[in-house]
Structures are given as C-alpha cells and as structure tokens.
Image (cartoon, rainbow, N blue to C red):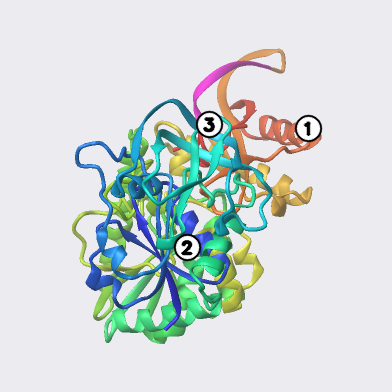
Amino acid sequence: MKNTIIILDYGSQYTQLIARKIRELEVHSIILPYDYSADQIKKYNVKGFVLSGGPSSVYEKNAPFLNENIFTYDVPILGICYGFQLLVKHFDGLVEGSKKAEYGSSNILFESKSILFNTIQTKNTVWMSHGDKVSKIPQDWEITSKSENNIISSAQNINNKLFGVQFHPEVMHTHNGKKIIHNFLFDICKANPDWTASEFISQQLVNIRDTVGNSNVICALSGGVDSTVVACLLKKALGQKVTCVFVDHGLLRKNEAEEVMNMYNKYLNLDVTLLNKSDEFIEALKNVKDPEVKRKIIGNKFVEEFENFSLKLKNVKFLAQGTLYPDVIESGGYGKVADKIKSHHNVGGLPEKMKFKLIEPVNELFKDEVRKIGQELGIPVEFIMRHPFPGPGLGIRILGSITEERLNILKDADKIFIQILKDSGYYDKIWQAFCVLLPIKTVGVMGDKRTYDNVICLRMVTSVDGMTADWFDLPPDILKLCSNKIVNEVKGVNRVVMDVTSKPPGTIEWE
C-alpha cells in the first residue's frame, strides 16, 4: 500500500495547494473534511497528517475542532496557520486576536534548530495570512521562529512529532516552502516517493470501472484539456460504454465548434456527437445580468440537454465532466467551512436534482497536473496547451445582458486578439488570454464624427495552477496593434483597455 499524507481541510483557499506540493514530490496525498471518521482513515497507509489553514478563529463558538482521531496513529502532524493554532489550543497554549495582523510577504528569523527547516537559511521570506496569533506555546513545545513583528511563526514538540507554522509553505511566495514540505515528508514522516502520473492513471482506471459497472456514460466535452483528458481516461477504462458529446451553446468563440470538432477528428480516436443548442441557451439567458444566475442557467441547460440526449441511448446513468479543483474551491470547496467565490456552472451551477450520477476523475487536480496526465496518455500538444476556456463561455465575459449583437462584437474582438498573440509568438507564453465586453459605452472620435460605443478589455495572465495569477506584460507595440485592429475592424467598439490585476485580489475571469 502506497504512502499517504492526509490533509484535514479547515476551509482554506490554499488547502489543495498543500496536496499539489506533496504530489509534486511524488507522495500520495488526499484531502478530507476535518471531522473525517477514524474508520474511513483506516484504509490508508498514513505517514502523516497536515492540518490546513482556515477562515475561523479557534476561540470562536462552533469553530472547526481538532479531530482527536489523528493522535491514534502515532505519525507526525504539521499544523499550518489555523491548524497550528488548533494544536496550540488543544495542548493548553494560548491563541488570541492580534493588533498586528500579518498578510502577505513577511520575514521570519529561526530561533532554534528544527528538522522542519533543515538546510534553510536563518532568515527566510514567507507568506502570511492571519489575524490571530499564538501568544503562548504549550508545555514541552519550543519556539523555532518569530516574524519581524516578534510574533511566533513556528513551534514544535519534537518528542511527540508535532510541528506548527503560522505561515503558508504551500504558497509559491514562501521562499523554500517546497523544501519545508520536503523535510516534513521525508525527514520527519519517512515517506517514500511512490506517486506519479502513471500511478494516478492506473488508479483512476480502476475507480472508473468500479464506479460505472455495467452502466453507460455520457462524457461532456468542451474542447479543453480537462474534459479531453477525462474522455481519454473513460475510453481507456470503458471503451464503447462512453458516448462523448460536445454542446454548442452559442457562447463559444468565433468558429470554435468547427475547430474543436476538427481537432477531435484529426488527433483523437473519439466518436464525438455535436449538439447545436445555441438558440435555446441564448433565449434562456435573455435579459439576465447577474453572473451567478447566468452560471446556474447554463449549468441547468447543459444537464437538460444531456438528459434529453440520453433518451436516445440505453442504460446511461453517469455524466462525466472535466471539473478541476479550482472550480470546486471557488464554488465552496469540499469542506463545510470554505467560502464561495463564485458558482462554477459544473459545480454550484448544477441542478439539485438530476438523473445522472457524476464522474469527475480530475476534480482534485490543478491544470498543470491535468496536463501531465494528458502527456502520459499521449494526448497531442494541440489539446494539452490550449488556453483554459470556461464552461459558460462568453456568457461570463459579456458583463450585463447577452444579445446576439454583443456576442458578435466579443467574438470578433477575441478572434483578432488571439490571432495577434499567435502570430507574434506570445500565445504559448501566456497561461490564459481573452477579451471582455464591458457593460459601458464611451465617447470617441472616428472619421471626425462623435461615437458612443462599447469598450473591450484585454485580459492576459500567467499562472501555474489557476489559484494565483499575475497579469502578463505584453510589449507596447503588440498592445497597440491589438487596440488598432479591434477598434478599426470590430463595428461598435471605440475603446480598448487592459486589465492589470493579479489573482488575488481579482479572479482570472471577470464573472
């Protein structure tokens, strides 16, 4: 049985980043709710526990509690942020609100040696995100570092294999964060690196076969890498029991339906059915402005179309989707205490009652991990490196009401923008790029005449996993070309702007 690190989720937006960092080091990890039962944990070869951060305060009434089942395993425990404070409180230390909250980058200074920080310099830059602080450590613990504000930033009880850090080693902004996790896995937990992309595929093939049994599956395809990987996994596991369906909902980019179908026919041995439902989706979205309502309408319409299509088939009991973990996180996460950022159409946007059971083989992975799985499956680079495109499509890139006229404006602008990026060699350097149609008009001058037309916003970001992102600094001459061509060639646009917001505080998509 392979090594497993169990991460107990207390609602942090970073919880899956912990799992991803551990998997990058080729150790199997799973995320469980903080109140997971001991019986459910028994099936794993547990080498250690990680307690995630979270938005609560440990001294609040009804705050998520420390699951004492973890102490029955005699394995190391690492508490991160809220998880650290839980350990301190449990062992009669003191956690209280701080007048000096710590958010963002901070410097810490190690005060005593710890195997957790082995080979890391005495001063280290870390990422903080907390308002409470540990003001008194428990008996038999020792402080291992403090922040530049003289706040305890880590402590340990080496004899009982208990470790806590107030900062977030899983976030890329923490220098040597991956090394800290490495030390916990291999020096403290004595884990072995035995989890790889090929191991994930083998495990998922078994899981899919066991789940589906003698039933049939509809696989929802979007043309992106996530759903394509899911389709290939299903075909490998189930063969003819899988029917792949691509729905043109009218919110795709210009000529995208034709391009996607050609790609499936050219590169992959997938028998894909195209359903043109543009009119139905656009009619359902008529006069709808609220993005949450848009997502729910689109999610419901997708399921409705799949259910109608399934009537032509036999014994279809499952719907497969390319849901990723960032979708799950932003829709409220797996746990009971995660905050909802937005309802993704394929998570929070799905109807409460539907005839299908869901299969989501990659819903605990990030985009970069899915791409590795795709490479292992032999999926061509044309699919693997496509920019992410949201399921609701242009419906969440048109701010305000969706009309045929506004759709055509955005499609034309986006086509020009993406083509310029490809022609100039920047497309493959950018993680995601797209246009947004804003719900405003501005005054302009064209041909010596006053205009009052729409505004297009260019959005370009770099990212690894979609959880954090920074804006891409496109050279001025390319930006100028984009602006000139869009304004000159797209009727109804007289102004182009650029979004220079990172994630956080923004999101990648605007809605």
Query: Magenta part of the protein: which range?
Result: 438-445
Quadrant in the picture for residue 410 = top right
**Mark 1 to mark 3 CA distance (whole Å):** 44 Å
**Mark 3 to mark 2 CA distance (whole Å):** 37 Å
The disc labelled 3 sits on which kind of residue? Asn
The disc labelled 1 sits on which kind of residue? Pro
- The residue under label 1 is 476
Q: Nearer the viewer, residue 370 or 354?
A: 370
The disc labelled 2 sits on which kind of residue? Leu
Q: Secondary structure at mark 3?
A: loop
Give the mark nearer the N terminus: 3 vs 2. Answer: 3
Q: Quadrant of the C terminus?
A: top left
- Position of residue 455 measured from the top left corner of the image (x, y, whole percent): 57, 26
- The residue under label 2 is 365
- The residue under label 3 is 150
Can you see residue 223? no
- Position of residue 468 measured from the top left corner of the image (x, y, whole percent): 55, 45
Q: Which circle, 1 or 3, is nearer the viewer?
A: 3
Q: Which SS type dominates the magenta stretch?
A: strand
Residue at 26 percent across and 59 percent down: it is 68
What label sits on residue 401 in the rendered view?
none
- Position of residue 71 measured from the top left corner of the image (x, y, whole percent): 30, 64
Q: Nearer the viewer, residue 426 or 471?
A: 471
Q: Secondary structure at mark 2?
A: loop
Residue 373 counted in the magenta span: no
Q: Secondary structure at mark 1?
A: helix
- Residue contact between numbered discs 3 and 2, judged by CB atoms under 8 Å: no
